[in-house]
Amino acid sequence: MSNNMKMIVFVILLGLITSLFLMGMDLLTAERIEANREAKFKSIVLNANDIDFNYGNIHDVFADRIDKIEKVVTTNDQSVSYFFYQDKTTKNISYEFAGEGVWGEIRGIITLDENLVEIINIAILAQVETPGLGGIIAERKYLNTFNGIIFIDDKIIISKKDNTPNQPNEVDAISGATRTSNQFRNIMNTNYELYKFAWFNGTEVEA
């Protein structure tokens, strides 16, 4: 076998081995990422309901305290599933929301009272807004301003801060990030309308 042929075979084998190694690492990483995402999701729901847990028993506590409920809405022969997570004690209801921000997807979890009216807690799972401006959307200090806010006519309002008292469904916008604030308002209202309809009108199936 010529030296050129040996070199070609070596390169092919090296590429094959490297590809297999990377595929294996991707698989392992994907599983770990999903496990971490699941734990984060469960921790947010449990924290929103003031349920004690640690990362050794989080899955058992979640299974014991939280009901996962699937509701199906069928429109024009198309069925869409909506998943809810209800605390067995407080009856608070959580669901995951998502939508486009200014620079990419904003995804999070909202927890409301059992009547789906009052916001108990909001947490952000992922966002790519501008750090120090729109990125404040993920900070706990800002998200806490939504606690106790109620949906009126299926809407909340996020508006620039002024000297007038806020309405029961109104939250101050992020200073210097009007576009992110407006997009977040749209995300919250759009998801709320869909999930509220599913909760009260959807068909419950075994989740």
Image: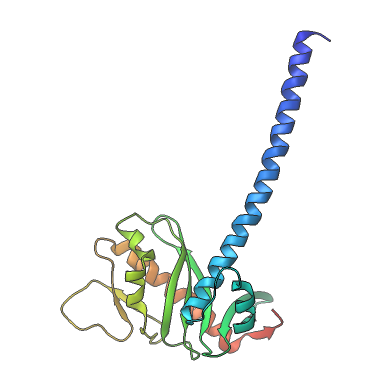
Q: Is 143 in front, or is 161?
A: 143
- The quarter holding residue 189 reads bottom left
Q: In this image, 168 relative to 186: left or right? A: left
Residue 73 seen in this snapshot? no
Residue at 59% in and 72% down: 58
Residue at 55% in and 71% down: 54
Residue 102 seen in this snapshot? yes
Q: In this image, 12 relative to 90: left or right? A: right
Residue furthest toward the right? 1
Residue furthest toward the left? 163
Q: Position of residue 140 (x, y in %)?
A: 36, 69
Which quarter of the rendering shows the C terminus?
bottom right
Residue at 72% in and 27% down: 14
- The quarter holding residue 15 reads top right
Vertical side of 45 occupied by 98: above or below = above
Q: Position of residue 28 (x, y in %)?
A: 67, 50
Q: Position of residue 31 (x, y in %)?
A: 66, 56
